[in-house]
Image: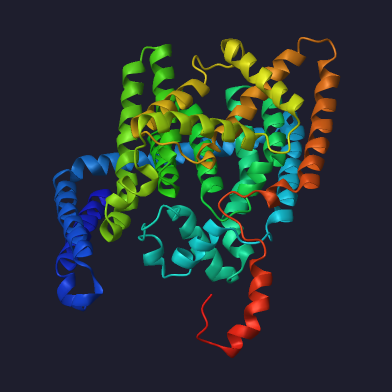
C-alpha cells in the first residue's frame, strides 16, 4: 500500500511540475529564456503529464515491481557483503594486500603529475562549465568538451576545496586510482587472479592512464563506470536479481552521460552479454535474453532522462550534429581510421619498450586462440567490443580521437596477461618466473614512465605549459592598463 501511495504522490508532483513548466514564461522575465528553451520545456511538461498519468493507471503493477525491487535490493546487498568477506578470506589476503600496494603505487604516480600545468580542454571545462552555476554546468552542451557527469563532480569538488587545479582534477584522480582494483576484479572474474594481478600492475604504471588520471576530463570516470558495468555483467550471467539488472542499466546510463562516446563500450557490453546467453542456451535462455533487452530499454530511458536538460537548453543537435560527428567522405574516412589506429597503438605503448609491447601482443593472440580453456565464458569480450566499434564508426564515418578507446586498454592488458600466464605455466618454473617477472616489470615500467616524464610531455587535449610564466610577465602591463587585451 505504501508503494502505491508513493506512486500517486510522484504522479501528482509530476503534474504540478508540468503545470509550472507550461506557465514558466509568465513566472520569469520574458527575456530570461530563449524560444528554443521554452519549446523544450513545453515538450518536457507534456512528457511529464503522460508519464504521470501512466503511473496512475499502472499504479498496482508498479507497486508490485517496487516491492520486488526493494526486496531483491536487500538480497543483492547481502550477496555483496558475502563477496567482501570472501575477499578477506585467508586464501585471498595476499592478493588483497598486493592490490592495495598497487593502488598506492598508482596514487603516487598520479600525484607526481596532478600539479602539472593546466591543459587546454580542462581549462575550457572550468571556464565554460565548472565555474558556472550547476544548472548551467549540466545543461550547456554547446561544445562536446562538457563531459557532463564529470563536470557535475568537478563542480562539487571545486566548491568544496577551492578553485585549484588539484580540486578540478580530483574526480579524475580518484577514478584513475580506483580503476586499478576494478580492473583486477574485472579480469579475475573473466580469467583468474594471477592475470588480474598482472593487469592491475600494468594499469597502475600505464603512462597514458596516469596522464588521463591527472587531466580533468571524463575519460577516467567513464572507464571506471564501464569496468563496473562489466563486473556486474559477469554476475548477471547467473542472477535474476532485479536490483542487479537495474544497477547494470544505471551504470551504463552514467557511462553514456559522462561522454556520449560511451555508446561504443555500452553497446559492446550488451552485445557480449546477449551473445553469451544465446550461445549457452540453457533452459531459461529466452527469459534471460528478455532481461537483457529490458535492461537495455531501462538504460535508454535513464540516459534520455539524464540528457533532458541538455536537449532543452542546447537542443538535440548539440549531441547528434556537432562538428565532431559530421560524416567524412569515404576515402578520407578510410585514411583517417588508419591514422587513428596507428596513433592509438602508439599511445597505448607510451614509454614501453618494443619487446614488451610485442610480448603483450603475443599474450593477446594466445588468449584469443585459447579462450575456451582460459575462461568460463563461451565468447571472448574482445570480439563484441571491437565489432561494435567497427560497425558504429563505419556507420558514422568518423575517426574518433585515440582517447575515446582508452577503455579498451585495460581489457587488452588483462587479456594479454592471461595469455602470457598460460604460456609461462607451460614451464616447470612458473611459480618462480611469475613473481620475478611481475616485480621486475613493475620496477622497470615505473622507472621508464618517471624518467621519460611522458605524462607531462604529452600534447593530448592541448598544452600551453608556460601560461603561468607568461601571465606573471604580463601582470605589470595589465595592472597599468586595465583595459588591455591579450
202 or 212, which is in the foreground?
Answer: 212
Q: Is residue 327 above or below residue 8?
A: above
Residue 88 seen from this side: no
Judging from the image, the colouring scheme is: rainbow
x%, y% of residue 164? 61, 68
Q: Where residue 259 sits in the image (x, y, percent)?
A: 44, 47
Q: Nearer the viewer, residue 471 or 254?
A: 471
Q: Residue at x 48, y 65 (%)?
A: 130
Residue at the image point whose x is 41% and y is 52% from the top: 144
* Front residue of this view, candidates 460 and 478: 478
In-image side of 413 versus 66 (left or right):
right
Is residue 322 among the parts visible in the rendering? yes
Q: Residue at x 67, y 57 (%)?
A: 114
Residue 245 in the image: above or below residue 372: below
Report x, y in % for residue 143. Answer: 39, 56
Furthest residue toward front: 331
- At x 26%, y 40%, the residue is 64
Total marks placed: 0
Which quadrant, please, contains the C terminus?
Answer: bottom right
State the image coordinates of residue 171 (x, y, percent, origin top left). 57, 55
Q: Is residue 48 above or below residue 241?
A: below
Q: On the image, which quarter does residue 448 sit in?
A: top right
* On screen, residue 158 above or below 109: below
Q: Quadrant of residue 21?
A: bottom left
- Horizontal relation, residue 302 to residue 165: left or right: left
Amino acid at each position: 500500500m505504501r508503494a502505491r501511495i508513493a506512486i500517486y504522490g510522484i504522479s501528482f508532483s509530476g503534474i504540478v511540475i508540468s503545470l509550472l513548466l507550461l506557465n514558466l514564461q509568465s513566472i520569469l522575465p520574458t527575456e530570461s529564456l530563449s524560444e528554443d528553451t521554452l519549446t523544450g520545456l513545453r515538450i518536457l511538461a507534456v512528457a511529464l503529464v503522460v508519464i504521470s498519468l501512466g503511473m496512475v493507471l499502472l499504479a498496482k503493477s508498479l507497486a508490485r515491481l517496487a516491492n520486488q525491487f526493494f526486496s531483491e535490493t536487500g538480497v543483492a546487498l547481502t550477496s555483496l557483503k558475502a563477496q567482501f568477506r570472501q575477499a578477506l578470506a585467508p586464501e585471498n589476503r595476499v592478493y588483497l594486500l598486493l592490490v592495495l600496494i598497487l593502488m598506492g603505487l598508482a596514487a603516487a604516480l598520479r600525484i607526481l603529475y596532478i600539479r602539472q600545468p593546466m591543459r587546454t580542454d580542462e581549462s575550457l571545462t572550468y571556464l565554460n562549465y565548472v565555474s558556472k552555476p550547476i544548472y548551467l554546468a549540466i545543461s550547456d552542451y554547446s561544445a562536446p568538451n562538457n563531459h557532463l557527469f564529470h563536470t557535475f563532480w568537478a563542480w562539487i569538488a571545486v566548491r568544496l576545496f577551492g578553485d585549484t587545479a588539484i580540486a578540478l582534477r580530483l574526480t579524475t584522480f580518484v577514478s584513475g586510482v580506483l580503476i586499478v582494483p576494478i580492473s583486477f576484479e574485472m579480469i579475475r572474474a573473466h580469467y583468474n587472479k594471477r592475470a588480474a594481478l598482472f593487469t592491475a600492475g600494468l594499469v597502475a604504471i600505464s603512462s597514458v592512464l596516469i596522464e588521463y588520471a591527472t587531466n580533468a576530463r571524463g575519460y577516467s570516470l567513464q572507464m571506471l563506470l564501464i569496468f563496473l558495468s562489466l563486473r556486474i555483467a559477469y554476475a548477471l550471467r547467473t542472477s535474476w536479481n532485479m536490483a542487479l539488472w537495474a544497477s547494470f542499466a544505471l551504470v551504463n546510463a552514467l557511462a553514456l552521460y559522462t561522454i556520449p562516446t560511451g555508446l561504443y563500450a555500452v553497446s559492446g557490453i550488451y552485445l557480449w552479454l546477449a551473445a553469451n546467453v544465446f550461445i549457452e542456451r540453457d533452459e531459461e535462455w529466452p527469459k534471460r535474453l528478455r532481461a537483457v533487452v529490458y535492461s537495455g530499454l531501462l538504460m535508454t530511458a535513464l540516459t534520455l532522462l539524464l540528457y533532458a536538460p541538455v536537449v532543452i537548453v542546447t537542443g538535440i543537435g548539440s549531441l547528434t550534429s556537432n562538428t565532431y560527428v559530421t560524416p567524412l567522405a569515404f576515402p578520407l574516412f578510410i585514411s583517417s581510421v588508419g591514422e587513428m589506429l596507428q596513433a592509438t597503438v602508439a599511445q597505448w605503448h607510451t614509454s614501453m619498450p618494443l619487446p614488451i609491447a610485442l610480448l603483450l601482443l603475443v599474450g593477446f593472440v594466445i588468449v584469443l586462440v585459447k579462450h575456451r580453456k582460459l575462461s568460463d565464458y563461451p565468447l571472448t569480450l574482445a570480439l563484441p567490443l571491437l565489432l561494435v566499434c567497427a560497425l558504429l564508426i563505419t556507420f558514422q564515418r568518423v575517426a574518433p580521437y585515440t582517447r575515446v578507446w582508452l577503455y579498451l586498454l585495460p581489457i587488452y592488458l588483462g587479456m594479454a596477461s592471461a595469455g602470457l600466464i598460460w604460456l609461462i605455466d607451460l614451464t616447470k618454473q612458473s611459480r618462480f618466473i611469475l613473481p620475478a617477472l611481475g616485480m621486475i616489470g613493475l620496477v622497470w615500467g615505473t622507472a621508464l614512465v618517471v624518467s621519460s616524464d611522458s605524462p607531462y610531455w604529452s600534447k593530448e587535449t592541448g598544452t600551453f605549459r608556460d601560461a603561468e610564466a607568461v601571465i606573471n610577465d604580463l601582470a605589470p602591463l595589465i595592472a597599468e592598463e586595465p583595459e588591455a587585451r591579450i
